[in-house]
Image (cartoon, coloured by chain):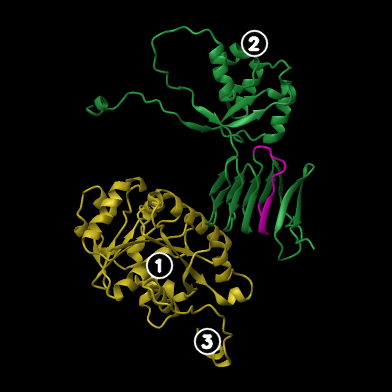
Amino acid sequence: MQNSLTRKPIEIKISTVVAVAILLHEASISVLEAALKEMTSGSPDFFDDEFAVIDVEAIADATVDWNALIPLFKSHGLHPVAVRHAREEDYATVRSHGLSIDVVSKPRLEAEQIAASAPVVVQAPVPAPLPVEPQIIVRNNPAMVIDTPVRAGQRIYARGADLIITASVNNGAEVIADGSIHIYAPLRGRALAGATGNTNARIFALTMEPELVSIAGIYRTFENGFPPLQANHPVQVKLNGDSIEVSSVKLVG
Amino acid sequence: MARIIVVTSGKGGVGKTTSSASFASGLAMRGHKTAVLDFDVGLRNLDLIMGCERRVVYDLVNVISGEATLNQALIKDKHCDNLFILPASQTRDKDALTEDGVEKVLNDLIKMDFEYIVCDSPAGIERGAVMALTFADEAIVVTNPEVSSVRDSDRILGIIQAKSKRAQAGGEPVKEHLLITRYSPKRVEAGEMLSHTDVQEILRIPLIGVIPESEAVLHASNQGNPAIHMKGSDVSDAYGDVVSRFLGQDIPLRFINYEKPGLLQRIFGGK
């Protein structure tokens, strides 16, 4: 293999990886398990083995049973890779599960001050080691815009974003967004908004003839036809408590 | 520059092979050097529709596997001097179609100065269908005016947009045409069939023609003649219109309105 002589056996580069953040408001494993079960409605591929960063800032005082928590997420198709705001005494446990400690970046000035106050040992300059951990950035992505019809068998997922479609979503197609879904054409397929649990997400369409709509895991099908609404008005689907509400979007005034 | 056109539908029995045969014949009748390829390995019937089944010696799979040259396998059409048929294999498995092999055959055809290469796709979304559409420049999506056919056409359009070379290269996409076949204006009028506007509303691609349901198609198939050769029939005229529109002419749709038969027609049983 002549090629391998010129090619490096390993290359390490900085890479931006999209991950979901799991914000814990409760430390009890049984409560979390029930909540996850409800969110995924038993679908094992709901999260599709996504990277996850567990953020325990909200329950900083509680003791977290890491040995139960991490397998719990894995069993629901989430793949925890790091923990944020973990207590220092938990570092060893977290690392023993192969997870990293994600230190939320402090303002630069503060970091420099810490460095300056630390005892300085003078030594020959050593080249800084390359960052090995992929940097995990969780962010609100700009809306995804689709201008072509979404056809039977096609599936579109706007990860961490709203989804805007200017063409029809046909029977047998599936459009999913972590945010809201806006369709400036007929919706005839399946639309799932707030896929990671955003209960404020909505679905809008110029004509609603969906096979299924879902918001934050709560879904509704229309076996007996779609509820009669004022014709020639766009329609919105939102969550009212724990039921799906369908209404016309009317001009005010 | 040669154009590769795939005739596809997803669903079976909607008229892909009938349309491929008539469309390719129509192009050849207008003086264009045309080849029509059967990708339905294992279930070939383009050769039957073209009336050349007794002249098949070598087929597409033989050419791909190097057992025959393209010149040996191409069959000259009995009606048109500049139309050639490359039949599918009856005995081979569809896995014999390799992407490299198909690409080489198509490139060799282009080198032989063919202007239009029509690929008759098998039904379904399996290997044969994907191979037929992979290298297409244009696609004619054959649809019957009923919901399952429309749904399958929608699916195949999605596959064209995902798996064709043009889609993967990210350049100009495959040019899509909608061809509605087995259209019965009478049944549309009675509300038993989707209208061509309904179908177009769902699929949202330009309509290249509407072929009326006709017994002439069955007669043509049985005789081994592409329906476009059934002079004087509405099907022949409709396929002629499709070819004209494909070549850039702007002509109005025909055979889409139901005319109640007059008294004389009812008495003498005109069709």
Going by the image, does A249 lie left or right of B17? right
Local crowd at mark 2 within 10 Å, few (<14), some, or many (≥20)? Answer: few
Seen in the picture, residue B45 relative to A46 is either above or below; the reply is below
* First in sequence: mark 1 vs mark 3: 1
Q: Residue furthest bottom?
A: B264
Q: Which residue is mark 3?
A: B269
Using the image, name the chain to which the residue with label 1 belongs. B
Q: Which residue is at a point 73% across and 28% down the rendered structure image?
A: A34
Three-letter code for the amino acid on which mark 2 is drawn: Glu
* SS class, disc 3: loop
Q: Which mark is residue B18?
A: 1
Q: Which residue is at a point 52% across and 72% down the rendered structure image?
A: B183
Using the image, name the chain to which the residue with label 2 belongs. A
Tell me where residue B245 sits by quadrant.
bottom left
Seen in the picture, residue B12 relative to B217 is either above or below; the reply is above
Same chain under badges 1 and 2? The reply is no
Chain letter for the part of the structure drawn in green: A
Gap in Å between the C-alphas at discs 1 and 3?
27 Å
Using the image, name the chain to which the residue with label 3 belongs. B
Q: How many marks?
A: 3
Q: Which residues are magenta?
A: A196-211
Q: Which residue is mark 2?
A: A89
Q: Quadrant of the N terminus of chain B?
A: bottom left
Of tags 1 and 3, the one toward the viewer is 1
Q: Camera-side residue: B185 or A117?
A: A117
Residue B149: x %, y % from top left:
53, 60
Q: Which residue is at a point 62% across and 53% down the rendered structure image?
A: A189
Q: Which residue is at a point 58% across and 57% down the rendered structure image?
A: A166
* SS class, disc 2: helix
Local crowd at mark 1 within 10 Å, few (<14), some, or many (≥20)? Answer: many
Chain letter for the part of the structure drawn in yellow: B
